[in-house]
């Protein structure tokens, strides 16, 4: 075990994958010599050379399109989109080509492609560096979509994604890169070295895609969350004095419906929490799953706490960000229903 930030865990995952399999290549904007804007690929080009870790032009469509062609030929490309907000030019390639390749070829070709991208707010990045576009990918058949909340899972999910024969989208909450964040921006940053999930195995391991984890056991209400919102949920439960069970979904597609069902049947109440905008957000899907699977166990309507239906406002960062006060208010609402 070694204390690692999420950045260091991701870099370590890249390193292990490239050492184990020479078909794994890493590329994107500034990921080579510079090591990535967040340093998640630091040192890889020096160790593995420019043919396996290299810089690409500022052209997301070209980056992903090239990677799809490489994947069809049996290479395992891991590409970094510098911010999730920049993925939109590549969206057609992801949806129309990567996600469909297995189906349209009758299984003759697969697309072992991993697309990593920092996502989410809480860093005063404004509307073009703070978006959470996970729902755009979870809607697309043929894609897997995951979002780790800690260094241990970030490394394990990356290695699992690289081993997967189909395309995997990894959304990395950049507010969590250097430490857990519970929504209290006025407090000092807590580094990962002071958190148990900052202890990361040094060797190869995978975190199963499609398997949730229980971040906090409880009996009063279930909170379904992922990414940064896991820590907001934990803080809200503590501050509200409610014995909430917090489920860290980790994987959005495939979704661990068994874990959701087991928790909601136990608690009888559910709050869905995500940072992305409300309308057509992934929370709507989660509410439907709970309604379909747990209707006769519910003691109150399912409630969702989300970002607002507006571009991420730079000047009103903490009014947009679904912090612990707003979550706690809705926990009390659910418990009082």
Image: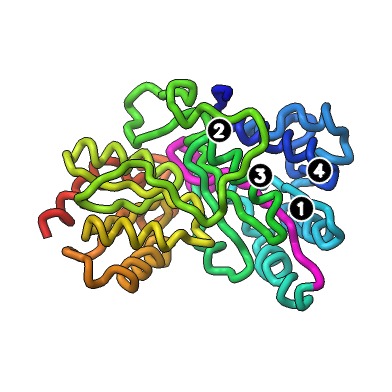
Query: Which residue appears at 38% of the width and 61% of the height?
Result: 283
Q: CA distance from mark 1 to mark 4?
A: 21 Å
Q: Earlier in the sequence, mark 2 or mark 1?
A: 2
Hey, which residue is sitting farthest left in the picture?
A: 336
What residue lies at 67% left-to-right and 37% top-to-bottom? Answer: 204
> How far is the residue under mark 3 from the one under mark 4?
11 Å
Q: Earlier in the sequence, mark 3 or mark 2?
A: 2
N-terminal-most mark, 1 or 3: 1
The quadrant in which the C terminus is found is bottom left
Quarter of the image for residue 8 reads: top right
Residue at the (87%, 36%) spot, across then down: 50
Q: CA distance from mark 4 to mark 2?
A: 23 Å
Pointer 4 residue:
21
Q: Secondary structure at mark 4?
A: loop
- In magenta, the rendered stretch is 108-129
Query: Mark 1, residues whose alpha carbon is within 10 Å: few (<14), some, or many (≥20)?
Result: many
The scheme the figure's colours follow is rainbow
- Which is closer to the viewer, label 3 or label 2? 3
Q: Which mark is residue 63?
A: 1
Can residue 237 be seen by looking at this rendering?
A: yes
User: Is 36 rendered above or below residue 292?
Assistant: above
């Amino acid at each position: 075990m070694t204390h690692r930030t999420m950045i260091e865990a991701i870099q370590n995952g890249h390193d292990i994958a490239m050492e184990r399999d020479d078909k794994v290549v890493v590329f994107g904007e500034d990921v080579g010599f510079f090591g990535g804007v967040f340093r998640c690929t630091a040192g890889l080009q020096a160790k593995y050379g420019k043919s396996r870790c290299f810089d690409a032009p500022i052209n997301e469509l070209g980056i992903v399109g090239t990677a799809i062609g490489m994947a069809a030929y049996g290479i395992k490309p891991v590409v970094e989109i510098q911010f999730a907000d920049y993925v939109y030019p590549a969206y057609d390639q992801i949806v129309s080509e990567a996600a469909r390749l297995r189906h349209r070829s009758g299984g003759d070709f697969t697309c072992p492609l991993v697309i990593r991208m920092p996502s989410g707010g809480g860093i005063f990045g404004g509307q073009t560096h703070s978006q959470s576009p996970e729902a755009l990918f979870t809607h697309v058949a043929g894609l897997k979509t995951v979002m780790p909340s800690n260094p241990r899972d970030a490394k394990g999910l990356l290695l699992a994604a690289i081993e997967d024969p189909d395309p995997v989208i990894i959304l990395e909450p950049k507010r969590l890169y250097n430490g857990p964040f519970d929504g209290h921006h006025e407090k000092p940053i807590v580094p990962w070295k002071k958190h148990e999930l900052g202890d990361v195995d040094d060797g190869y391991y995978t975190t199963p895609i499609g398997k949730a984890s229980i971040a906090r056991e409880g009996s009063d209400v279930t909170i379904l969350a992922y990414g940064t919102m896991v820590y907001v949920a934990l803080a809200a439960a503590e501050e509200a004095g409610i014995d909430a069970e917090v489920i860290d979904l980790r994987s959005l597609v495939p979704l661990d419906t068994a874990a959701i069902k087991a928790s909601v049947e136990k608690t009888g109440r559910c709050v869905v929490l995500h940072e992305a905008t409300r309308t057509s957000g992934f929370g709507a899907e989660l509410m439907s799953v709970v309604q379909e699977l747990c209707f006769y166990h519910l003691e109150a309507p399912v409630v969702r706490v989300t970002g607002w239906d507006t571009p991420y406002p730079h000047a009103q960062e903490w009014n947009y960000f679904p912090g612990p006060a707003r979550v706690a208010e809705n926990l009390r609402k659910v418990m009082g229903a």
